[in-house]
Image (cartoon, grey):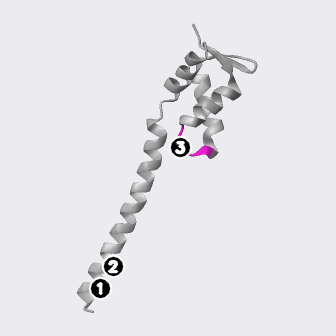
Amino acid sequence: MSRKYQKAEKKEAALAAASKKTTEEQVEQTSESTFKWKKVIKRKLKDNGGEMKIKKLKKAVLEEYSGDVDDFDAIFDEKLQKCGAVIDGKKASLGA
């Protein structure tokens, strides 16, 4: 093999590896950013008469969530606080 061919092959391999990393990072970012937390939480509450247990709500939202499950509990708790739902003990309900 000529040196020119080897250099081109190495460069091509490096570009392929870089683009693969970028694509994986983009998929992670889009899966987190495109999930409509407030919309899903409110819809699940509305479908169940406006009130349900937080544990049941969390399970229902998890069924639709396609992101990293390891961080789900922390993210869910944060989004539940921000979505305007009223939390009373173990139950969550739609705010007026």
* Mark in the foreground, 3 or 1: 3
- Magenta highlight: main SS: loop
Residue nearer the viewer, 79 or 92: 92
Q: Dot 3 corresponds to which residue? A: 67
Dot 3, crowdedness within 10 Å: few (<14), some or many (≥20)?
Answer: some
Q: Is residue 66 above or below residue 13?
A: above
**Residue type, label 2:** Lys
Q: Is residue 84 visible?
A: no
**Residue type, label 1:** Gln
Q: Dot 1 corresponds to which residue? A: 6
Residue nearer the viewer, 14 or 62: 62
**Residue type, label 3:** Gly
Q: Where, quadrant-wise, is the C terminus in this rendering?
A: top right
Q: Identify the residue at horizontal 39%, vertical 55% (top origin).
A: 23
Q: Which residues are magenta?
A: 65-69
Q: Are marks 2 and 1 in contact (CB under 8 Å)?
A: yes
Q: Identify the residue at horizontal 35%, vertical 74% (top origin).
A: 13
Report helix, strand or loop for mark 1.
helix
Q: Identify the residue at horizontal 61%, vertical 44% (top origin).
A: 69
Dot 2, crowdedness within 10 Å: few (<14), some or many (≥20)?
Answer: few
Q: Position of residue 93 (x, y in %)?
A: 64, 15
For the image shown, how many numbered marks are present on the structure? 3
Q: Position of residue 22 (x, y in %)?
A: 39, 57
Q: Dot 2 corresponds to which residue? A: 10
Q: Position of residue 15 (x, y in %)?
A: 33, 68
Q: Earlier in the sequence, mark 2 or mark 3?
A: 2
Q: Position of residue 50 (x, y in %)?
A: 60, 13
Q: Is residue 71 above or below residue 76?
A: below
